[in-house]
Amino acid sequence: MTKIGVLGAGTWGIALARMLAVNGRDVTVWSALPDELKTLRTTRRHPNLPGMELPESMHYTADMAELCAGKDLLLFAVPSVFVRSTAKKAAAHMPDGQLIVDVAKGMEEKTLMTMSEVIEDELAKAPGHGHCRVVALSGPTHAEEVARDLPTVIVAAAKDVTDAKTVQKIFTNPNFRVYTNTDRLGTELGGAIKNVIALSVGIAMGLGYGDNAKAALITRGNAELSRLGIAMGCRPETFAGLSGMGDLIVTCTSMHSRNLHAGMLIGRGAAAEEAKKEVGQVVEGINALPAARRLEKKYKVEMPIVDVVDAILSGKMAARDAVDALMGRNLKGE
């Protein structure tokens, strides 16, 4: 039986842990919060995933050494801001060549690393880790739907296609289809930048704009993402796929989207911190925004939607003025 350790007991980590357990995998969930684990163990419910019941076969631990021992695969499902600290804790307890899957979406502001790169960086600092096998699992996925076994399609991206295919086999079931990709950077870039674009769509909705504006922001947002990715050496077709346009569509249109919800609140006048508090869960677009701006400048690409979202969140521009700023730009070809 495949043994899997899940680091993180948020909605995405628990939805995937449940799915894997139902698939017949031996699943153990780790959290740094013992009370969180106690609730999961005793109620077999997650407070933010209504209607989902966790299998009795699932295990829970707050001991990192126990979590990492003898696992075929470790799944990193902590928020992006905690990926580095979690990888640092785990590195001492996992063997060299451990297969790791990361599902956190974001870019580290200080280093501009993707989450897979952050994990690799921490492993490289720890003794005995000369061989890293990190796969990014990303795409148009809401935990709320995966927890209910609704049809979902995702992509496993790795430098070594063999690792991507291994993850594909472990995760695929009749309701969860996994494709493979070797453009890991492009796949992760899409998962990070789409959250910023979703904030812009939410802001437009909060201002009362309609479907035309929503479609324009999604499409032109994907153009910005593609422009940046190509400048960074990624494959153009990645951004037309699941982790590019696919993830943009679901994050910019679904009311499950925390980034869309936060953007709507900001469009109605809330400050970024107020919006985060109201949403009550991690809003990854706000976390990814500083890195997106730095990448834009580093690679000298135009990302006007990212620019106006940054201006709004920093208080330099009123949300309603952002539309004039975007619509009044110099005319050009598509």
Image (spheres, grey):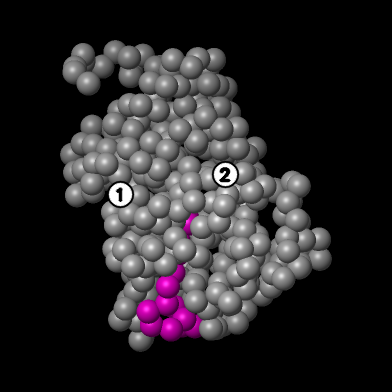
- Viewer-closest of 246 and 217: 246
Q: Label 1 belongs to which residue? A: 186
> Which residue is at a point 29% across and 57% down the rendered structure image?
182
Q: Where is residue 152 drawn, in percent x and y?
A: 53, 45
Q: Amino acid type of disc 1?
A: Gly
Between the residue at mark 1 and the residue at mark 2, the CA separation in whole angstroms equals 24 Å
Q: Label 2 belongs to which residue? A: 151
> Which residue is at a point 31% across and 63% down the rendered structure image?
161
Q: Left of 212 or right of it: where is 294?
A: left
- Which label lies toward us, 1 or 2? 2
Q: Where is residue 306 drawn, in percent x and y?
A: 35, 33
Q: Left of 96 or right of it: where is 147?
A: right
Q: Where is residue 69 drawn, in percent x and y?
A: 55, 83
**Span colored in magenta:** 91-104
**Would you place residue 40 above or below residue 317 in this image?**
below
SS class, disc 2: loop
**Would you place residue 32 above or below residue 287 in this image?**
below
SS class, disc 1: helix
Residue 288 is tagged as: none
For marks 1 and 2 on the same chain, the one whose residue lies earlier in the sequence: 2
Q: Is residue 8 visible?
A: yes
Q: Amino acid type of disc 2?
A: Pro
Q: Quadrant of residue 113?
A: bottom left
Furthest-right residue in view?
42
Q: Where is residue 28 drawn, in percent x and y?
A: 63, 72
Q: Left of 120 or right of it: where is 283?
A: right
Q: Is residue 185 visible?
A: no
Q: Are marks 1 and 2 in contact (CB under 8 Å)?
A: no
> Is 100 in the magenta?
yes
Q: Quadrant of residue 21?
A: bottom right
> Is 173 in the magenta?
no
Number of numbered callouts drawn: 2
